[in-house]
Amino acid sequence: MKVHEEHRKSGPKNLTLAIFTVSTSRYEALKRRENIGDKSYELAKETLEVYGHRVKIYRIIPDDELEIALSLLNALDDEEVQAVIFIGGTGPTARDITTKTIRRLLDKELEGFGEIFRFYSEREVGSSAFLSNATAGTKEGKLVFCLPGSPNAVQLAIKKLIVPELGHLIYLAKRK
């Protein structure tokens, strides 16, 4: 058995996650009590649940550094939560600050996540794949992912990258 296969086998099979959708427009609409949908979150939740994982925390937050940072830190304080996913705010506009904010807080960034995500994305959307600043990393022995807000991008990241490696990554993140 290869080392990565041993790590996958040693890692937990059913994880508990927090998901935050980062979108000022959705946050403001929610404050106005408007009925808003969140297709990206719904796809993420459904896909994770199919593979035996559970979403414990879900919130829509604005594109605000303090809100993003506090959301991450509060989720990490929850002993049940093993991974946190941020959806949105990974693009090239001035208000896309999720990745920049999260990178400052990570203990270790997993640069390969963004690279392989853009590789798979290019097959679906062509050269615009490089506009994504998706990333992943570890913080306090837990996993953190920053994904684009597009439902297709979320589905791709969760099915092709996150779900296959969650147990493996948790196993490694908890090692000293």
Image: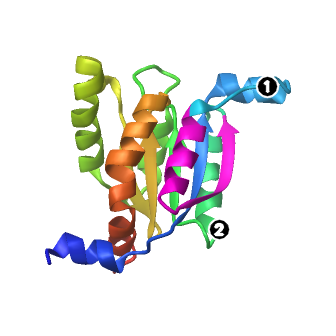
Q: Position of residue 175 (x, y in %)?
A: 34, 79
Amino acid type, mark 1: Asn
According to the picture, the residue beneath numbered tag 1 turns out to be: 35
Q: Position of residue 106 (x, y in %)?
A: 42, 56
Determine the residue positioned at 52% across, 38% down: 87
Q: Position of residue 147 (x, y in %)?
A: 44, 39
Determine the residue positioned at 60% across, 58% down: 73
Amino acid type, mark 2: Asp
State which tag comes first along the sequence, 2 or 1.
1
Is residue 176 found inside the magenta-colored segment of the image?
no
Determine the residue positioned at 28% across, 25% down: 124
Quarter of the view holding residue 37: top right
Quarter of the view holding residue 119: top left
Q: Which marked residue is nearer to the observer: mark 2 or mark 1?
A: 1
Please give the range of residues in magenta.
Answer: 40-61
Quarter of the view holding residue 6: bottom left
Residue 160, compared with residue 132, is above or below; it is below
- The residue carrying pointer 2 sits among few (fewer than 14), some (14 to 19) or many (20 or more) residues within 10 Å by Cα, namely few
Q: In the visual, does 44 lie left or right of 99?
A: right
According to the picture, the residue beneath numbered tag 2 turns out to be: 78
Residue 153, compared with residue 146, is above or below; it is above
Determine the residue positioned at 53% across, 61% down: 53
Query: Which quadrant holds the N terminus?
Result: bottom left
Q: Secondary structure at mark 1?
A: loop
Between marks 2 and 1, how big is the CA–CA gap? Answer: 29 Å
Choose between 176 and 53: the one closer to the eye. 53
Furthest toward the left, the residue is: 2
Q: Position of residue 49 (x, y in %)?
A: 55, 55
Q: Are marks 2 and 1 in contact (CB under 8 Å)?
A: no
